Image (tube, helix red, strand yellow):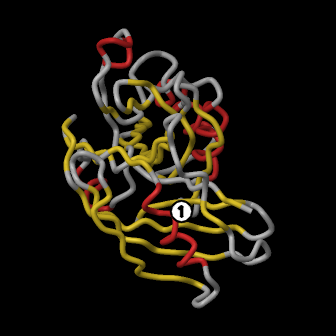
Amino acid sequence: MRAFPFLCGAFFLTSLGHLPAEQLPAMRPALLGTGKGSLINLMDAERLMKRGQTDAIVRFTCGVNYSGQGYNMFTYRGSANARPLAEEAIDKLERATFVPAVYLHEKTNSLLSGTIIYAVISGKPHLRIYLNQEEEHLNHGDDFISPQPVFPPQDKFHGFDMPNETVSADVGVTLNIDATGKLKDAKLVSESPPGAGFGAAVMNKISLVTFLPAYSHGKPVASITTFHIIFRGRGRGTHWYTN
């Protein structure tokens, strides 16, 4: 059996998604967008406050197809009280419209991950969504987007092999990705349970994944990021998240 990955990634605003195909850039990460149908504008911060939501944080991952539709949202690594916040995001995802990723001047399917932060300040709710999950960038509110995997038609990656479908596992890999999206180096840094073959399964296929580079203030940049690939036993697939 093969298992597909989910990967993490910062709040980014642009109107490039409205350009005709011939004017699309060579590369662009999937983005939240800014219109009425964007996820952040569909989520109801006032309703969350009425439900008793207090300051909370939750991470998420979802697919974004080439037409900008989101699907299969997972929420995880949230604060203890983040369930209403997570439920609101999942509920609004199917109605949300994203700006799709672009690879080689064509819109393409991608995996998009980020962090939702909710806070009540002076009696008013505030909602922020970032497309990264890295503490340093979240603490500073940086306009930073972690690398995103994309799946163009010519893609050779079809998921990681699961060594044992009944076992769940956690594999940590540090990826060095340059400003063009090229994977320069990958190092296995953790594997639990050890010696069960999951680390090898990731390392055998990681070079086949097509990445967009990280972006800072709208410009591609080199980055070194540690990703965790979570294998869920009994055929439940894998889930990616960053430290």
- Point 62% across, 23% down: residue: 95
Q: What percent of the width, then of the height, locates residue 7?
A: 48, 53
- Closer-to-camera residue (29/9): 29
Q: What percent of the width, then of the height, locates residue 201?
A: 57, 72
- Point 75% across, 61% down: residue: 236
- Closer-to-camera residue (52/74): 74
Q: What percent of the width, then of the height, locates residue 103?
A: 38, 33
Which residue position is annotated with label 1? Answer: 77
Question: Is 9 placed above or below 164 here?
Answer: above
Judge from the rendering whether residue 83 lies leftward or rightward of residue 102; answer left or right: right
- Closer-to-camera residue (1/117): 1
- Point 53% across, 60% down: residue: 240
Q: What percent of the width, then of the height, locates residue 22?
A: 33, 12
Question: Is 94 placed above or below 57 here?
Answer: above
- Where residue 177 sits, quadrant-wise, is bottom left
For the N terminus, give its image quadrant. bottom right
- Closer-to-camera residue (69/128): 69
Judge from the rendering whether residue 38 lies leftward or rightward of residue 3; answer left or right: left
Residue kind at label 1, given as amino acid type: Arg
Question: Is 78 placed above or below 179 here?
Answer: below
Tally of marks? 1
